[in-house]
Image: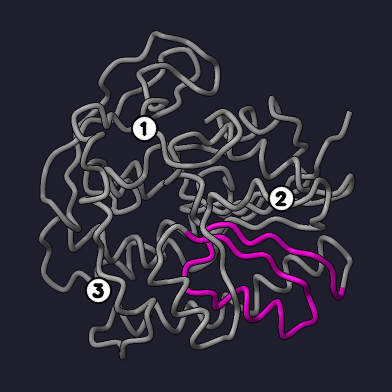
């Protein structure tokens, strides 16, 4: 439906959503290292350089590729080094994410829309700081977890259209947009619920990063076929600007490069992948100090540009 954000893979076609060019051809192949071990193709727009996943062969059973291990999200005890690293970083970043929202909005409390809220850890932090939070999540298990552990009601993503116009002071999407089949429609729906001075926070991998260039098809943040769109700062700023958003700020998500590098080393089948990933992550982080457009993951802060 035109006014809904329900998943619709018919919109994932071989044309560029950034510049609308049809000059899109295969760029490289990469493997789904997490679930199916199958190979998928990433297409490139030759006009603006945007990259996108070809899901034309799996549109009917895309849900099968989304059956990743969610034990950590659902409160299971971490077992491996990478599991413990994930939990440690998550707890630190929950505080940082609150600080990002507070510092950029200038508000100690307000109304937040957290889209793609997973199990509600961040939503819970914002509620504890006095914010009114609307959370949306596609997976029922995560919504149940949030209700049982945080007493926080999440809504299915389809319910986004039920929110009133201009009700949100801030909207957050932490590594979410790249999963959704129609990013243009989703951003327009989120824009609709933002106040005139509302801010949009979007974190996502950077397809133009040093680690993406180094690991090539083994880069863990391709995460095919779950990641459909592979933005760089240049392509995402252009895409968001066309939809009425003005970039205020962008910065690195500081720990992502280490986690992604460790997983990428594992994808390559390397021994001591944790150690190797930490070393390479440090190198990429130091290199990106001089070129902030090459960081591993980017947090974008946009202002709602109301005409």
Measuring from the top left, give residue 67's x and y in whole percent: 24, 60
Q: Residue at x 40, y 66 (%)?
A: 140
134 magenta-colored? yes
Q: Residues within 10 Å of mark 3 (few under 14, many from 20)?
A: many
Measuring from the top left, give residue 94's x and y in whole percent: 59, 77
Q: Residues within 10 Å of mark 2 (few under 14, many from 20)?
A: many
Q: Residue at x 62, y 73 (%)?
A: 123
Which of these two is toward me, 143 or 105?
143
Of the numbered discs 1 and 3, the one sitting upstream in the chain is 1
Please identify, in this view, whether the residue under mark 2 or under mark 3 is nearer the observer: 2
Of the numbered discs 2 and 3, the one sitting upstream in the chain is 2
Residue 260 lies left or right of residue 245; in this view the side is left
Residue at disc 2, secondary structure: strand
Residue range corresponding to the magenta coloring:
108-137
The disc at residue 262 is: none
Please identify, in this view, whether the residue under mark 1 or under mark 3 is nearer the observer: 1
76 up-or-down from 97: above or below: below
16 magenta-colored? no
Say how the picture is coloured.
one colour
Judging by the rendered image, the residue that carries numbered circle 2 is: 200
Measuring from the top left, give residue 216's x and y in whole percent: 26, 41
Q: Residue at x 32, y 47 (%)?
A: 226
Residue 179 lies left or right of residue 167; in this view the side is left
84 up-or-down from 39: above or below: below
Judging by the rendered image, the residue that carries numbered circle 1 is: 9
Q: Quadrant of the C terminus?
A: top right
188 up-or-down from 122: above or below: above
Q: Residue at x 56, y 54 (%)?
A: 203
CA–CA distance between discs 2 and 3? 34 Å
Judging by the rendered image, the residue that carries numbered circle 3 is: 274
Please identify, in this view, whether the residue under mark 1 or under mark 2 is nearer the observer: 1
Residue at disc 1, secondary structure: helix
């Amino acid at each position: 439906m035109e006014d809904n954000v329900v998943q619709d893979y018919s919109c994932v076609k071989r044309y560029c959503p950034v510049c609308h060019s049809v000059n899109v051809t295969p760029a490289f192949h990469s493997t789904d290292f997490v679930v199916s071990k199958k190979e998928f193709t990433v297409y490139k727009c030759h006009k603006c350089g945007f990259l996108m996943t070809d899901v034309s062969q799996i549109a009917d059973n895309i849900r099968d590729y989304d059956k990743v291990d969610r034990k950590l999200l659902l409160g299971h005890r971490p077992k491996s080094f990478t599991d413990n690293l994930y939990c440690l970083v998550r707890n630190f970043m929950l505080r940082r994410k609150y600080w990002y929202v507070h510092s950029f909005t200038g508000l100690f409390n307000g109304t937040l829309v957290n889209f793609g809220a997973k199990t509600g850890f961040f939503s819970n932090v914002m509620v504890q700081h006095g914010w009114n939070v609307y959370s949306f999540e596609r997976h029922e298990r995560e919504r149940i977890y949030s209700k049982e552990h945080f007493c926080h009601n999440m809504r299915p993503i389809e319910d986004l259209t039920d929110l009133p116009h201009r009700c949100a002071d801030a909207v957050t999407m932490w590594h979410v947009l790249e999963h959704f089949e129609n990013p243009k429609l989703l951003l327009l729906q989120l824009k609709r619920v933002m106040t005139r001075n509302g801010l949009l926070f979007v974190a996502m991998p950077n397809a133009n990063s040093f680690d993406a260039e180094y690991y090539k098809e083994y880069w863990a943040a391709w995460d095919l076929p779950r990641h459909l769109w592979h933005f760089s700062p240049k392509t995402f700023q252009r895409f968001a600007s066309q939809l009425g958003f003005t970039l205020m700020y962008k910065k690195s998500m500081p720990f992502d490069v280490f986690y992604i590098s460790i997983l990428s080393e594992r994808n390559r089948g390397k021994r001591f992948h944790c150690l190797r990933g930490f070393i390479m992550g440090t190198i990429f982080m130091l290199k990106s100090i001089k070129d902030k457009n090459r960081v591993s993951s980017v947090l974008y802060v946009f202002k709602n540009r109301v005409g």
